[in-house]
Every structure is written in structure tokens, then in C-alpha cells.
Amino acid sequence: MTPRLAAGSLVIATHNRGKLAEIDALLRPFGMRCLAAGALGLPEPEETGTTFVHNALIKARAAAQAAGLPALADDSGLCVDALDGRPGVYTADWAQRQWFEGPPGRDWNLAMGKVEGLLQGLGAGASRRASFRCVLAIAWPDGSDVAYEGRVDGDLVWPPRGQNGFGYDPMFVPAGHEQTFGEMAPDAKHSMSHRADAFAKLSREQFGR
């Protein structure tokens, strides 16, 4: 039987403020008090998985054991059809600056440029189809866990457009729309995002709605 969340404290196993804000907004109506892993001083485990599900479970299990509370982790990324699904689980790694590119940290303009450079290298006829994938995993201190997967399909544009969102949002236009995620108001993006799709599955099973 699938374990269920009860209203109360839930550790969000991310140090990404953008993800934390999105997840908190989704869970707040269900009486969940979201606690950031960073604010609790929890270390980030090494993400050694080769799938979104595996990496999400690694993070959720580590946070649940360290905090002694239920924990939710997100693992998500951009999968580009013409690049054989890359960057995929390495989506964040593509934004990591090297020592010769500037100070340590993530540079999403750099990451988007890498994707575009590879697509341009394939020629003008290369498909620009892509999808954002998201897995939301919940783990409990007793070792129970469950995962929910969502996705949104679309196309990549260049140059990037919009200042909203984070990550690759400014170059991704969801199917059936003209604006990028970076141009959309947050509420509009949240209603159709890969995270929203995964959360819809989570909320049906965990909260019955």
C-alpha cells in the first residue's frame, strides 16, 4: 500500500530557490509546512543515478534519514530529441562553470548556449523538439518511498526570451503556446509545467484530489 503524507512538516530536498518556491506553492494548500534542506543544514548527497527517478530517490531518502521527517525531492531536466535525450540527468551539470569560464557556480546562459551550439552543429534541419521531465520522490524515515513522473513537450527557440522562471525556461516554448516559459507569468507556467504534471499525479494519490 502506498504510504501517505499527513499535514505537517515536509523537508524539500533542494538547494535551488526556484524549485523550492514552485514546490512550496503547490503544497501549501494541502497544509504542508515546507522546510528547505539548506535551511536545516542538510548536506547534498552525490547524485549517482542514471535516471531522474533514481536521483530523486537518492535525495529524498538522504533528507528523510538526516531530518527524521518525510522529505520530498525533485529531479528534473531538459531532454532534447536531436541530442539523444541530452542533457537529461546532467541538465544542471551543463550550467556548471569551469575555472576558465568565471567564478564557480551555475551559469544557465552558458548551459543554454551549449544546447544551441550542439543543435546548430547538426545543421538547419535539425529537430528542435524537446521535453522537460520531472520526478517528485517522497521518502519517509522508516524507509518507505514513492515517485511520480511528469513531462511537458515543446520546442526550443534561439535567442532565449524572457526573464521569468529559471534554468532553460527562456528557450523552451511548450506545445500549443507562443511564449517561452521565461516569458510566461509564474502561475501560467506552473499550471502546465513538468513539475505540475508530476504534482497532479502526486496530489491524486497522496491527497485524493
Image (cartoon, rainbow, N blue to C red):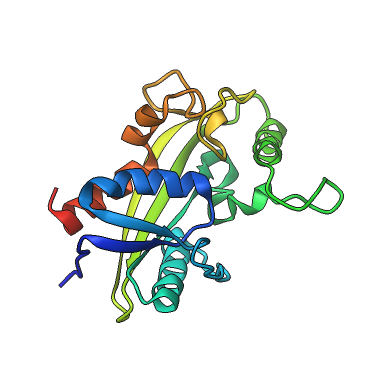
Foreground of the two, 126 or 183 = 183
Instruction: Say whether residue 128 is visible.
Output: no
Give x and y (percent) for residue 137: 36, 62
Q: Is residue 145 left or right of residue 44?
A: left
Give x and y (percent) for residue 23: 37, 48
Foreground of the two, 93 or 61 = 61
Taking the spot 31% from the left edge, 45% from the top edge, the residue there is 26
Give x and y (percent) for residue 9: 31, 63
For the N terminus, the image quarter is: bottom left
Q: Is residue 67 left or right of residue 2?
A: right
Q: Quadrant of residue 120?
A: top right
Q: Is residue 11 left or right of residue 200?
A: right
84 above or below 48? above
Give x and y (percent) for residue 166: 54, 38
Taking the spot 65% from the left edge, 37% from the top edge, the residue there is 112
Farthest residue toward the left? 208
Q: Is residue 159 left or right of residue 15?
A: right
Farthest residue toward the top? 178
Instruction: Say whether residue 54 is visible.
Output: yes
Foreground of the two, 56 or 187 = 187
Farthest residue toward the bottom? 142
Taking the spot 39% from the left edge, 73% from the top edge, the residue there is 64
97 above or below 49? above
Q: Quadrant of residue 184?
A: top left
